[in-house]
Image (cartoon, grey):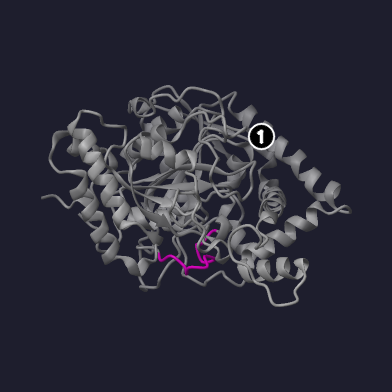
Amino acid sequence: MTDLTKLTLAEARDGLAKGDYTSVELTEAHLKSMDAHRNLNAYITETPEKAMEMAKASDAKRAKGDAGKMEGLPIAVKDLFCTEGVQTTAASHILEGFKPEYESTVTSNLFGNGAVMLGKANLDEFAMGSSNTSSYYGNVINPWKDKSGKDLVPGGSSGGSAAAVAANMALAATGTDTGGSIRQPASYCGIVGLKPTYGRCSRWGIVAFASSLDQAGPMTKTVRDAAIMLGAMAGHDAKDSTSAPIAVPDFEAALTGDIRGMKIGIPKEYRVDGMPEEISKLWDNGVAMLRDAGAEVVDVTLPHTKYALGTYYIVAPAEASSNLARYDGLRYGQRVMDDGDSLDDMYMKSRAAGFGKEVQRRIMIGTYVLSAGYYDAYYNKALKVRRRIYQDFEGAFGQVDAILTPTAPSAAFAIGENEGDPVKMYLNDVFTVPASLAGLPGISVPTGLSAEGLPLGLQLIGKPFDEETVLRVGGVLESAANFTAKPAGQEG
C-alpha cells in the first residue's frame, strides 16, 4: 500500500471516496508517524484515542453515504484553538491543565465536516514569536536540516503545525496568523500557508493575541489542499462580531490554472536594504513564472510599507496587554499563592510564573504604549499609519489583481541563533506584516531552495475576500515552480 502519510489532502480524500483505504487506516498511519518523529516536538498534546474514535465514526458516516468536505482526514490543531475536553495551553504555563468546556468555531466547522484530530500542535507562547522557541513546552525542530546538520527553527508562531505537515505527521493543520504566523513558518518548512481575509474565519474560541489582527487559516502540502481546508473552516459566525456575513465560495473551483490577462503587482518597497541575493533571485524567478503563464507584471508602490513593522509592534503588543489581563490565576489556569498573600500578590506571582519572557516583554511594551502619557504619541499614531497602509494597498489593487512578494527575508535559521536580539527576530515578519495590518488574504507557496538546501517561499497578497484569486495565482506559481524537495526521511 502507498505510504498514506505522504498523500496530499486531496489525494487522501479521493482515495477514501474510492475505498482504497479507511479513515482508521489513514489515522493509524499518521499516529505511527507521530511516534517516529516525536523528537521534533511538534505536538503539545497528542490525542490518539480521540483520533481513532473520530476515524471510526467517520468511516461509519461514509458507509451511509454521508461524507463531509474533509471526511476522515487526520489533521493537527494548533494549540491556540479551544477544543472541548482536550487541554488547550496556548503553549503557556499559565494555561497548563485548562480543558475548555466548549469548541472553537473553526474546529467545530472542521469536525462537522469530518476532519479527525490527531493532537494539539506546539506554537510560540500565546502566538508571540517567529521561531517557535518561546513555548513553555520546548521548541519545535524543523524537519529540514542545513548542510551543517544543525537543528533549525520551523518559524512561528505556527511552527508545530508547519513541522507536523512537513514531516508527514498530519495531512494538514490549522494555524493562526497575526503578523505572519502562518505564512513565515510555511516558508521555512516548505509547505503552503494561507492567511485568509480578516473576518473570513471566526475567531470565537481562539485564544486571543491581538484581536484586530488574529486570523485562522490552513497549513497544507499543496495550494489545492489549502482551498479544500479553507472551505471547511470558513463561514459567518454570530458569536464573533468581526466575522464577515458573506457566503463561502467553492475555493477549489477557483484553481483553473489560467491566469492569462491577470495583472500581478510588484511593490518596489519590498526590495529592502540588505535583502539576500537568493531572496531577490527567487522573487525574480517568480515574476518570470507568472509572466510566462500569461500574466501581466505591473510595478506598484506601497509607500508606507517602511512603517509597517514599527506600527505592528505597537498595535499588536497593545492589544496583547489588554487580552492577557484576564490571566490572573483566579478563574482558571496556574495560581501561585503563599499563606498571607494579598490578592495583588497572587496576581503578580501567578503572572510572573505563568508567562514566559517574550510574553512579558510584549505585555510591558503594550502597557507602555497604552499608558496615559504615550497613548496619543504611539498607539493613536500607529492606528493612523495602519490606515495609510491599507489605503496604499487599496490604491495598488486599483491597478492589479494580486501582489507578489517574498514571504520571509531568509531561509530557516539555527535554533538559538537570533535569541539575544529581539529586534532581529521581529524583522522576520517584515514581508508579512503589511498584509496583516490591512486585513488582506495572503498565501505562501514554496518555490525554491536556498544555497543551504532549505525551502524558500513567495507570497501572494489579494484583495479583501478574494481568496479565490490568491489561490488561482498560487496554484499556477506552485505548478511552475514544481517544488518537489522534501526534508530528509520524507522523500518520495
Q: Would you say 60 lies left or right of 418 here? A: left
Work out whether residue 211 or residue 373 is closer to the camera in this orientation and state it.
211
Q: Residue at x 34, y 56 (%)?
A: 47
Whole-percent x, y for residue 97 in the image: 50, 62
Q: Point out the image quarter for the C terminus.
A: bottom left
Residue sitting nearer the eye, 330 or 87: 330
**Relative horizontal placement of residue 244, taking residue 121 as reference (left or right):** right
Residue 139 on the magenta segment: yes
Q: Position of residue 269 (x, y in %)?
A: 62, 43
Image quadrant assignment for residue 59: top left
Quarter of the image holding residue 427?
bottom right
The image quarter in which residue 253 lies: top left
Q: Residue at x 22, y 54 (%)?
A: 28
Closer to the camera, 423 or 396? 423
Residues in magenta, as a range: 130-141
Q: Which residue is mark 1?
A: 390
Residue 207's x, y, as percent?
A: 56, 50
- Picture residue at 65% right of the left edge, 63% below the top: 329
Residue at point 10%, 50% (across, down): 1
Q: Is residue 86 left or right of residue 382?
A: left
